[in-house]
Image (cartoon, grey):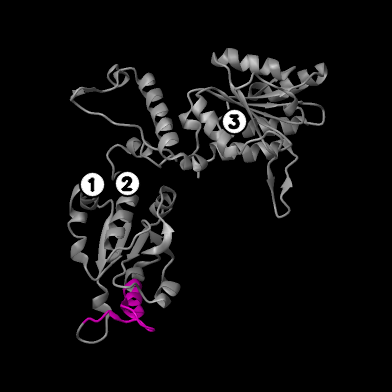
Amino acid sequence: MIVTVITPFPELLGPFFSTGVIGKAVEKSLIDIRFINPRDHSDGHYGQIDDYAYGGGGMVLMAEPLARAVDEAKAGGQAFVVHPGPQGVVLGQHLVESLASKEHLVIVCGRYEGVDERFVDKYVDLEISIGDYVLTGGELPAMVIIDAVARLVPGVVGQEAAVEEDSFFRGMLDTPHYTRPSSWKGSEVPRVLTGGDHLKTSSWRRRQSVARTLGRRPDMIARANIGPYLDKGVYVILVPARREVTLEEAEAIADLGASFGCERAIFISTDEAFHKELQESLGGKGKVLRSPGRAIAWIKDREKEDPFVIICGSTDRGSIHWLEAKRLGLASGRPIVFLAGEGAESFTPDPGQQVSLGPVRGGRDDRTLSCPRDTLAVILDRFFGRR
């Protein structure tokens, strides 16, 4: 990956690119860091790159020296141009992942009151803010952007699995970490981490990540895929599976559930002939049972625990927001069941083990989706899609 930093003060960034993880990445040629000083592209003998703002105010970086610097950076091919500034898109992990996919990243550092807006309009692909505060220049944000992006370049971080466990990488906060000694000032390392049982350790870390995110940053749940943080399985139950639900539709729903990590799609049918035909058609992708109660009992027996049931209803009566249902399902630690279809609302599990979602709406007219497959696709994406 090539990163070109356009700055009148390259000396500010030199130590950053020669030490630590970033320094090693540069040394191994995993990242090629380049500097261009806009003063080298100024007119006159004094290297002037700024002037007074029209209408009053402080000094503003001139468009022409910056434009020439970008043209030099792009001389070898295409590049994605970023300008750090307080008016830009706030930097988040999703944006970092997008920037990491670029082969050549050009970062134009501002100074003083900012840069000529005409340069931004014509040359900048994206403005990025690292927070709602103002700095004296763009060099610090440039280092933040490069550090975050570099971690995702293969080989930069020694253990790539560690990157996937970082806060925000999967949409959740990281688990707490400990090192030697096991006892420090009366505080002990959690026993599960010193016991050597990797399965128990993994489960503990997932639960800690969930607890931290729910307690400190519940807003993150909206864009997180909660699947990797569940200790129990996820199931879809369609009620009822009558002849109006074709074999092709049933197979599509089973495939949809599997694509989002569901353990099994269960279809309810009281028609003996159709029951058998549907089971043969589904094979191992789904299961056919005669009632929602039997389906819940089968899941309970399989998971050794009562499931948390999310009823995907067709009315708003008694329903909660999908984000609250997502939070409650994650916090429950139990198997999660999505109960959908025309007969879903008539089923009543034990109190405290269910929530109801309102209808899924969308489109210009805010219409309710009537197809079970489409409804499930939207709901499953909200819970298990990655944003």
Mark 3 and mark 1 in contact (Cβ < 8 Å)? no
Mark 2 and mark 1 in contact (Cβ < 8 Å)? yes
Q: Earlier in the sequence, mark 2 or mark 3?
A: 2
Q: Residue 347 in the image: state x and y as whole percent.
A: 72, 23
Q: Find disc 1 in the rendering and name its residue.
A: 21
Residue type at numbered disc 2 = Arg
Q: Say which quarter of the image contains residue 297.
A: top right
* Residue occupying image coordinates x 55% and y 22%: 335
Residue type at numbered disc 1 = Val
Q: Is residue 175 left or right of residue 239?
A: left
* Residue 237 can be seen in this image: yes
Q: Say which quarter of the image contains residue 90.
A: bottom left
Mark 3 secondary-structure assignment = helix
Q: Earlier in the sequence, mark 1 or mark 2?
A: 1
Q: Residue 152 in the image: state x and y as whole percent.
A: 35, 46
Q: Find disc 3 in the rendering and name its residue.
A: 258
In-front residue for pair 324/379: 324
Q: Residue 232 in the image: state x and y as whole percent.
A: 51, 22
